């Protein structure tokens, strides 16, 4: 049975397609029109209490939160290939940067663009400058977060960097743009882009 992704191309679910393509698992898309607020329908809120996308349904299991979905897919469908094994010492690095993206990079960028004033010592994302320095350190001297081996952490971390660079929400430093170019060259990313584009055309978007 195919996995079902509740999806709209103008949402984080577009990035989840990349995760699915990397995992190499069959999936079906169920379009949710976020412009019409369909994500707040009771049947969708029953799956994702936030009333947001993406939401993945795998048989009886529901997974929400884009980063959690990606890590789930790697552990469930590509262990050892996209996710280091539990006893692999690289597992710590893998989890570290996969969590860093939504819990530090994203709120730090949002805080700056929204002019939030927070106490850096209390806010989990600290300062914007410290976030940038840490993000650069994650990539220093290696093509991917784990070194030579690409992993699902790159989908989460790199996918967010690509989005932020594209929307000019983060400084397009060479370390970031070179990394994103390596990710863009992946066949699974290109398949995902093609699928997202086809869905945009089908829905009359863009
Ligand atoms: N923390 C969530 C964020 C999900 C999210 O904000 N999704 C947006 C689209 S990218 C959404 O569904 N917005 C519609 C709404 O909030 O009603 C995740 O990473 O999956």
Image (cartoon, rainbow, N blue to C red):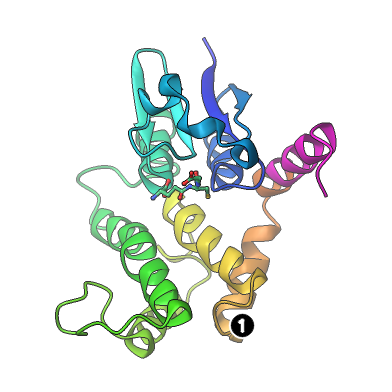
Dot 1: within a 10 Å radius of its alpha carbon, few (fewer than 14), some, or many (20 or more) residues?
some
Give the secondary structure at mark 1: loop
Quarter of the image where one finds residue 38: top right
Foreground pick, 92 / 52: 52
Magenta span: chief secondary structure:
helix
Q: Residue at x 60, y 65 (%)?
A: 162
| First to last magenta residue range | 191-206
Residue 87 coordinates in the image, percent (x, y): 19, 46
Residue 161 coordinates in the image, percent (x, y): 54, 68
Left or right, 117 with respect to 8, comes to left
Left or right, 121 with respect to 166, comes to left
Residue 172 coordinates in the image, percent (x, y): 61, 82
Q: Residue at x 45, y 52 (%)?
A: 151
Q: In the image, is residue 38 part of the stretch drawn in magenta?
A: no
Residue at far bottom of view: 129
In the rendered picture of this protein, how many numbered marks are placed on residues? 1
Residue 88, placed above or below residue 81 = below
Residue at far left of view: 122
Q: Residue at x 64, y 42 (%)?
A: 35
Residue 100 coordinates in the image, percent (x, y): 33, 65
Residue 49, placed above or below residue 164 = above
* Residue picked out by circle 1: 172
Residue 88, placed above or below residue 131 = above
């Amino acid at each position: 049975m195919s996995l079902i992704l509740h999806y709209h191309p103008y949402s984080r679910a577009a990035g989840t397609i990349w995760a699915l393509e990397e995992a190499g698992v069959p999936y079906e898309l169920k379009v949710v029109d976020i412009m019409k607020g369909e994500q707040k329908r009771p049947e969708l809120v029953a799956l994702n209490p936030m009333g947001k996308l993406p939401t993945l349904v795998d048989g009886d299991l529901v997974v929400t939160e884009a980063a959690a979905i990606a890590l789930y897919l790697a552990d469930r469908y590509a262990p050892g290939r996209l996710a280091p094994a539990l006893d692999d010492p690289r597992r710590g690095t893998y989890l570290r940067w996969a969590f860093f993206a939504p819990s530090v990079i994203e709120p730090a960028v949002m805080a700056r663009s929204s002019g939030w004033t927070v106490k850096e010592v209390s806010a989990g994302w600290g300062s914007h400058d410290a976030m940038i320095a840490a993000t650069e350190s994650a990539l220093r001297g290696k093509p991917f977060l784990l070194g030579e081996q690409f992993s699902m952490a790159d989908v989460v971390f790199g996918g967010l960097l690509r989005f932020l660079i594209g929307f000019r929400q983060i400084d397009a430093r060479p370390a970031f743009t070179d990394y994103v170019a390596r990710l863009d060259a992946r066949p699974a990313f290109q398949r995902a882009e093609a699928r997202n584009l086809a869905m945009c055309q089908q829905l009359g978007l863009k």
